[in-house]
Image (tube, grey):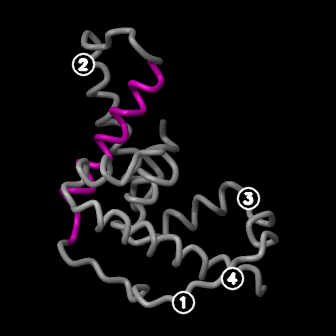
Amino acid sequence: MYAVCLRYARSPSDAADILQEGFVKVFTKLGQFQFQGSFEGWIRRIMVNTALRTYQRQRFDHESSGYERLPEHPVEPDALSSLSEAELLRLIARLPDGYRVVFNLVAIEGFSHAEAAEMLNIQESTSRSQLTKARRWLVEQLEKIQMR
């Protein structure tokens, strides 16, 4: 569950705080688990929701990163194959907050844009835009790695 929290957090210490807060919620709501799905999935959902609430408390209203006008370029498969999982997670962790949260929800957790928008209290089009910008930023970083 720490890995889930780490994907949403800005730092390892923030992830540890989210994990602790999430497990407190797990233990206080344990009686509400209805055995209708996996226990791990139930805990994961609590961790994601806890991370989202933390993000919303810390969110900047007008986050700008300067990556809004990145050109779209194809990335050679070699760039991805040369990255370890840890390196890829470090790249994702460097995404600006809004991009990272939407990327985690949609691309990694598998939520739809409508679901992500509802969770984050944003428009569905904003979710789509944030994901596009996150992907462009990641492509740029992968191209830099490939050039090395």
Residue displayed at 82% across by 71% down: 78
Nearer to us in this view, 75 or 94: 75
Q: Quadrant of residue 125?
A: bottom left
Q: Does the CB distance between marks 1 and 4 fall below 8 Å?
A: no
Element type at mark 4:
helix
Q: Which residues are magenta?
A: 39-60
The residue where tag 1 is placed is 71
Residue displayed at 57% across by 84% down: 72
Which dot marks residue 84?
Answer: 3
The residue where tag 2 is placed is 29
The stretch drawn in magenta includes residue 24: no
Disc 3 to disc 2, C-alpha distance: 36 Å
The residue where tag 4 is placed is 143
Q: Quadrant of residue 48?
A: top left
Q: Quadrant of residue 46?
A: top left
Residue displayed at 61% across by 77% down: 139
